[in-house]
């Protein structure tokens, strides 16, 4: 009997953990407030990344990339080669130009700057590859290093290798 009650206890704990397995991340509704800083250099770096994201990355205006990116841009995403030209080729192919939004379209959790680094964390909706009917939310991050010329020189993100040429959650991105 003791063995059975122990198993029942473990089962109930498992149910409780499964029921509370995730608290989905929540976006900050005021993106512009995240751009402020008492330090003018940090505010400028945040604005640079914010505008790059809206105009080049989401807006698909690859002709504007030289205003934001170093030609020797270093990429740490395992799916895209380094260099501004490689970024334009890969991302430009996936994102034709469209009107530029006044805010980043994906839900932004935070925009944080420290020194020459700006980190943007966002809510990413993804489909479980093991159970395609299960959709969940995760925190995605993109981190950028700004060089002394005020251009994006380096990028990191949390991307695994893409499946069929698509990043996780691509079907849900704007």
Image: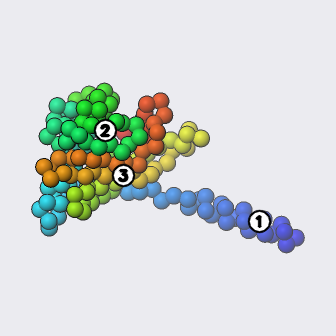
Please report whichever mark, 1 or 3, sits nearer to the chain's N-terminal start: 1
| Contact, mark 2 vs mark 3 (Cβ under 8 Å) | no
Instruction: State the SS at label 1.
Output: helix
Check disc 2: other Cα within 10 Å, few if <14, some if 14-19, many if 20+: some
Q: Label 1: which residue?
A: 8
Q: Label 3: which residue?
A: 141
Farthest residue toward the right? Answer: 1
| Position of residue 74 measured from the top left corner of the image (x, y, whole percent) | 29, 43
In the picture provided, is 5 more to the left or to the right than 164? right
* Image quarter in which the N terminus is found: bottom right
Q: Label 2: which residue?
A: 82
Residue for point 14% across, 50% down: 150
| Position of residue 153 measured from the top left corner of the image (x, y, whole percent) | 23, 46
Residue 103: assigned label: none
| Position of residue 143 measured from the top left corner of the image (x, y, whole percent) | 31, 52
Is residue 110 visible in the rendered image? The answer is yes
Mark 1 and mark 2: Cα distance apart in space: 54 Å
Instruction: State the SS at label 2.
Output: loop
In the picture provided, is 157 more to the left or to the right than 35? right
């Amino acid at each position: 009997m003791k063995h059975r009650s122990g198993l029942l206890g473990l089962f109930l704990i498992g149910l409780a953990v499964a029921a509370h397995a995730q608290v989905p991340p929540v976006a900050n509704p005021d993106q512009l407030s995240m751009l402020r800083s008492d330090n003018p250099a940090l505010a400028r770096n945040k604005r640079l990344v914010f505008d790059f994201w809206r105009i080049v990355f989401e807006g698909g205006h690859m002709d504007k990339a030289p205003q934001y990116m170093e030609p020797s841009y270093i990429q740490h995403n395992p799916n895209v080669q380094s260099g501004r030209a490689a970024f334009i080729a890969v991302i430009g192919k996936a994102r034709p130009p469209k009107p530029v939004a006044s805010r980043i379209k994906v839900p932004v959790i935070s925009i944080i700057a420290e020194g020459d680094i700006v980190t943007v964390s966002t809510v990413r909706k993804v489909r479980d590859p093991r159970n395609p009917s299960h959709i969940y939310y995760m925190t995605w991050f993109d981190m950028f290093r700004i060089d002394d010329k005020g251009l994006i020189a380096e990028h990191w993100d949390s991307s695994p290798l893409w499946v069929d040429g698509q990043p996780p959650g691509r079907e849900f991105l704007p």
